[in-house]
Structures are given as structure tokens and as C-alpha cells.
């Protein structure tokens, strides 16, 4: 459990933008991303996997499943004191997102950065 809404809001955006970047690189238009994906990171992940994305971190899917519905409806911004329960602690979640962003980059041919 973790009560810091900004942390999970930013993790949601890291997933959203990295997956949208992957889809855009693979030919999705801005309009298609806006209309078909929006802020739905679960759908973005599913679509990316369908066209060849392979998540490196084993917990990515679990974290996306928890954050997806909250991110899509902006609930991570306005938790009203309710904790978000994730399959990992915040440090592991941050590491998982970093691994995810690295996986997106490596699968698109972008050099890794530290």
C-alpha cells in the first residue's frame, strides 16, 4: 500500500506515454491513439503486445492491471485518503516501470540510457 497519489499518477503516465510511443512508432496515428486508446493503459499494453511488444519485467502486467482502471478515470490524482494496493512496493513499482521503459526503447532500437 502506498498513499502518495502523485507517484502512481506519474507511473500511469509513464506506461501510457511509453506504450503510445511504441504504437506510434509502429504506425498508429495520433488520432487513432487518442480515439482508441485515450488514457487506457490496459488497452495500450494489449495492442502493443498484439503487434510484437514483449514486456521484460514480469510484474508489468500486474501493475498495469491495478493502475489501469485508476489511471483511465484519473482516480490516482484524487484518492481521498484511500491507498492503492499494488502487487509490489513503490520501489519495486518504480524499478518495474524503468525496466518497462527500457524494454520499449530496446524493442524500437533506441539506445539504452542510465
Image (spheres, rainbow, N blue to C red):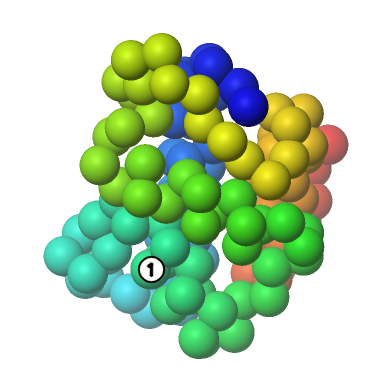
* Viewer-nearest residue: 70 or 50: 70
Please tell me which residue is depicted at 70% across the width and 28% down the height of the picture: 90
Q: Which residue is mark 1?
A: 43
Q: Is residue 11 visible?
A: yes
Please tell me which residue is depicted at 72% across the width and 56% down the height of the picture: 59
Q: Identify the secondary structure beneath mark 1.
A: helix
Looking at the image, residue 55 sits to the left or right of residue 4; the answer is: right
Please tell me which residue is depicted at 16% across the width and 65% down the height of the picture: 35
Residue 27 percent across, percent down from the top left? 38, 78
Residue 11 percent across, percent down from the top left? 54, 36
Q: Is residue 49 above or below residue 8?
A: below
Residue 28 percent across, percent down from the top left? 33, 74
Crowd rating for badge 1 (residues with CA inside 10 Å; few <14, some 14–19, many 20+): some
Please tell me which residue is depicted at 31% across the width and 20% down the height of the picture: 78
Q: Is residue 7 above or below residue 98?
A: above
> For the C terminus, which image quadrant?
top right
* Viewer-nearest residue: 25 or 23: 23
* Viewer-nearest residue: 26 or 3: 3
> For the N terminus, which image quadrant?
top right
| Residue that extends furthest to the right in the rendered view of this protein | 114
Amino acid at each position: 500500500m502506498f498513499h502518495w497519489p502523485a507517484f502512481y499518477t506519474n507511473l500511469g503516465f509513464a506506461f501510457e506515454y511509453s506504450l503510445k510511443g511504441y504504437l506510434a512508432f509502429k504506425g498508429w496515428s495520433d488520432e487513432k491513439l487518442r480515439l482508441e486508446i485515450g488514457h487506457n493503459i490496459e488497452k495500450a499494453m494489449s495492442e502493443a503486445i498484439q503487434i510484437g511488444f514483449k514486456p521484460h519485467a514480469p510484474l508489468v502486467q500486474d501493475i498495469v492491471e491495478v493502475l489501469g482502471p485508476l489511471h483511465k478515470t484519473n482516480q490516482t490524482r484524487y484518492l481521498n485518503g484511500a491507498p492503492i494496493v499494488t502487487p509490489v512496493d513503490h520501489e519495486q513499482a518504480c524499478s518495474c516501470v524503468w525496466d518497462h521503459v527500457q524494454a520499449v526503447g530496446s524493442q524500437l532500437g533506441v539506445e539504452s540510457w542510465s
